[in-house]
């Protein structure tokens, strides 16, 4: 009985994974399984928090060293796509100067993912907006000014 139930659960999980991979692509699927750069950075130099029209929020934390992003992370209370996109927004920020950060848009994230289903494209723009908000916070508030995450 237990074996049958375990088999059932495993098959169901495999099916969900296959469907997710088919809909979102391999890159997004792998990042969804392993969302790198998730969490907050204490005493971040830049903190951005944006809530989209869907009601979900993405936060991006940045720490700079010698004029470049040394550490970046994200948090979200949103969908799987917002997790994937927040993770790539943080990854894209690493090693970049403030000027270079301004080039990162929702389209940049979508390019890495090879696109997203139409209804999830806004998640990439939400993550990019949170990154730009974090940069703006860094540029206008200065190093060492930290705001608390609300997630
Ligand atoms: Fe709201 Fe993805 S961020 S649905």
Image (cartoon, rainbow, N blue to C red):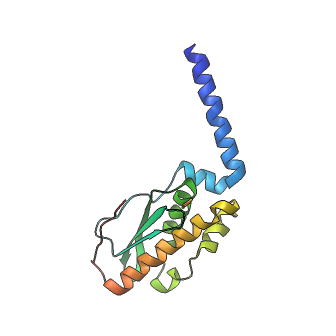
Q: How many marks?
A: 0
Q: Nearer the viewer, residue 99 or 11?
A: 11
Q: Residue at coordinates 54% horizontally, 60% vertically from top-left?
A: 82
Q: Quadrant where the C terminus lies?
A: bottom left
Q: Residue at coordinates 61% horizontally, 35% vertically from top-left?
A: 13
89 w.r.t. 100: above or below: above
Locate residue 8 relative to residue 127 in the image: left or right: right
Q: Residue at coordinates 62% horizontally, 23% vertically from top-left?
A: 7
The extreme top residue here reads 1
17 w.r.t. 108: above or below: above
The extreme right residue here reads 22
Q: Position of residue 86 (x, y in %)?
A: 51, 63
Q: Position of residue 38 (x, y in %)?
A: 44, 57
Tell me the quadrant of ligand 1. Answer: bottom right
Q: Residue at coordinates 42% horizontally, 64% vertically from top-left?
A: 73
Locate residue 34 relative to residue 146 in the image: left or right: right
Q: Quadrant of residue 3?
A: top right
Locate residue 135 relative to residue 89 in the image: left or right: left
142 w.r.t. 117: above or below: below
- Is residue 45 in view from this perspective? yes
Q: Position of residue 121 (x, y in %)?
A: 64, 65
- Is residue 94 in view from this perspective? no
Q: Position of residue 127 (x, y in %)?
A: 52, 68
140 w.r.t. 109: above or below: below
Q: Quadrant where the N terminus lies?
A: top right
């Amino acid at each position: 009985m237990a074996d049958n139930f375990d088999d059932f659960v495993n098959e169901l999980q495999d099916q969900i994974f296959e469907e997710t991979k088919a809909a979102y692509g391999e890159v997004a699927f792998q990042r969804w399984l392993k969302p790198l750069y998730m969490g907050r950075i204490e005493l971040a130099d830049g903190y951005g928090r944006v809530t989209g029209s869907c009601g979900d929020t993405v936060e991006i934390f940045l720490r700079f060293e010698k004029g470049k992003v040394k550490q970046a992370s994200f948090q979200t209370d949103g969908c799987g796509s917002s997790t994937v996109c927040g993770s790539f927004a943080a990854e894209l920020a690493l090693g970049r100067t403030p000027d270079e950060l301004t080039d990162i848009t929702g389209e940049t994230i979508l390019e890495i993912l090879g696109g997203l289903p139409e209804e999830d494209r806004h998640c990439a723009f939400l993550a990019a907006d949170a990154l730009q908000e974090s940069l703006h916070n860094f540029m206008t508030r200065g190093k060492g000014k930290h705001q608390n995450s609300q997630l």
